């Protein structure tokens, strides 16, 4: 993983100029993640040599997951802060979303760049969800969590449905690093170069008015 670290900065600027710098990094294939305790400063800028991606037609939906899809309701951007807080739970193993990073995501959401998928249980409680950066044909998944069985997997399925409705069979979900959990859903790996090709293709398809809105 150390070879995926490309640069280090002191901290993140949550002002307008700082947000534009962060967006420019995403558009160039980098993403921020803190190197300190709990994801605190200093900030690492990462670009994995092998990028985990979910591509159209690759999503695997098991029989048990189909049952879970019927059990849970979902929404889009209804409780972005709640999803971020679920992902940032300090009791989770490997927790990395610091208070400063949380501010960044909330600012990006307010500006229309960050979006969430919420998954709700029968009692109306937040059972899980995911959030990430929405660049049109490319969605950069930042984190997901679950409190109910399969709830994070349901969020991935609903994200794929949202992207298919918007983009047809021409989208990419960047999960940054693949894991066995994500591979069970159909996530595969691209070389860093192939990922950049897809990034530039997304930019071309969305046009500068969307990709740089």
Image (cartoon, grey):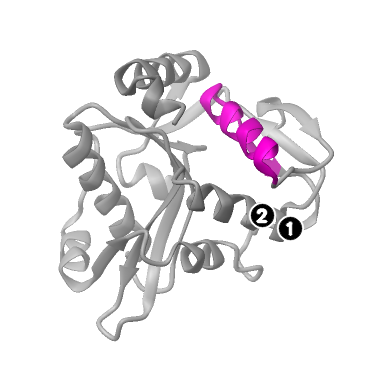
Residue 124 appears in the picture as rendered? yes
Image location of residue 133, percent across then percent down = 46, 42
Q: Which mark is residue 38?
A: 1
| Residue 12 found in image quarter | top right
Decide: is 75 above or below 113: below
Image location of residue 46, percent across then percent down = 65, 31
Quadrant for the C terminus in the image: top left
Element marked by disc 1: helix
Decide: is 47 above or below 68: above
Lateral position of residue 128 relative to residue 102, left or right: left
Q: Is residue 26 magenta?
A: yes
Lateral position of residue 100 relative to residue 182, left or right: right
Image location of residue 190, percent across then percent down = 43, 22
Secondary structure mostly seen in magenta is: helix
Image location of residue 209, percent across then percent down = 38, 24
| Residue 150 found in image quarter | bottom left
Q: Residue at point 34% right, 33% down?
A: 136
Q: Give yes or no for contact between labels 1 and 2 (Cβ–Cβ under 8 Å).
A: yes
The residue closer to the viewer here, 203 or 63, is 203
- Check disc 2: other Cα within 10 Å, few if <14, some if 14-19, many if 20+: many
Element marked by disc 2: loop
Q: CA distance from mark 1 to mark 2?
A: 5 Å
Q: Residue at point 57% right, 51% down?
A: 107
Quadrant for the N terminus in the image: top right
Residue 1 appears in the picture as rendered? no
Q: Which residues are magenta?
A: 15-33
- Check disc 1: other Cα within 10 Å, few if <14, some if 14-19, many if 20+: some
Q: Residue at point 60% right, 63% down?
A: 88
Residue, disc 2? 96
Of labels 1 and 2, earlier in sequence is: 1
Q: Residue at point 80% right, 34% down?
A: 9
């Amino acid at each position: 993983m150390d070879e995926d670290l490309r640069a280090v900065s002191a901290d993140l600027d949550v002002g307008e100029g700082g947000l534009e710098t962060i967006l420019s990094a995403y558009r160039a294939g980098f993403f921020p993640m803190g190197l300190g305790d709990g994801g605190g400063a200093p900030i690492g800028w990462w670009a994995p040599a092998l990028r985990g991606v979910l591509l159209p037609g690759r999503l695997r939906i098991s029989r048990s997951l189909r049952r879970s899809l019927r059990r849970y309701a979902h929404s889009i951007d209804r409780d972005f802060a709640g999803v971020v807080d679920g992902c940032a739970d300090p009791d989770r193993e490997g927790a990395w979303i610091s208070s400063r990073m949380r501010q960044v995501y909330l600012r990006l959401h307010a500006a229309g760049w960050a979006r969430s998928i919420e998954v709700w249980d029968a009692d109306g409680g937040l059972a899980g969800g995911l959030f990430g950066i929405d660049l049109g044909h490319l969605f950069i998944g930042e984190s997901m969590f679950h409190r109910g069985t399969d709830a994070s997997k349901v969020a991935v399925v609903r994200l794929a449905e949202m992207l298919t409705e918007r983009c047809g069979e021409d989208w990419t979900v960047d999960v940054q690093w693949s894991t066995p959990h994500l591979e069970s859903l159909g996530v595969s790996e691209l070389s860093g170069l192939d990922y950049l090709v897809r990034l530039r293709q997304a930019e071309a398809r969305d046009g500068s008015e969307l990709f740089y809105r």
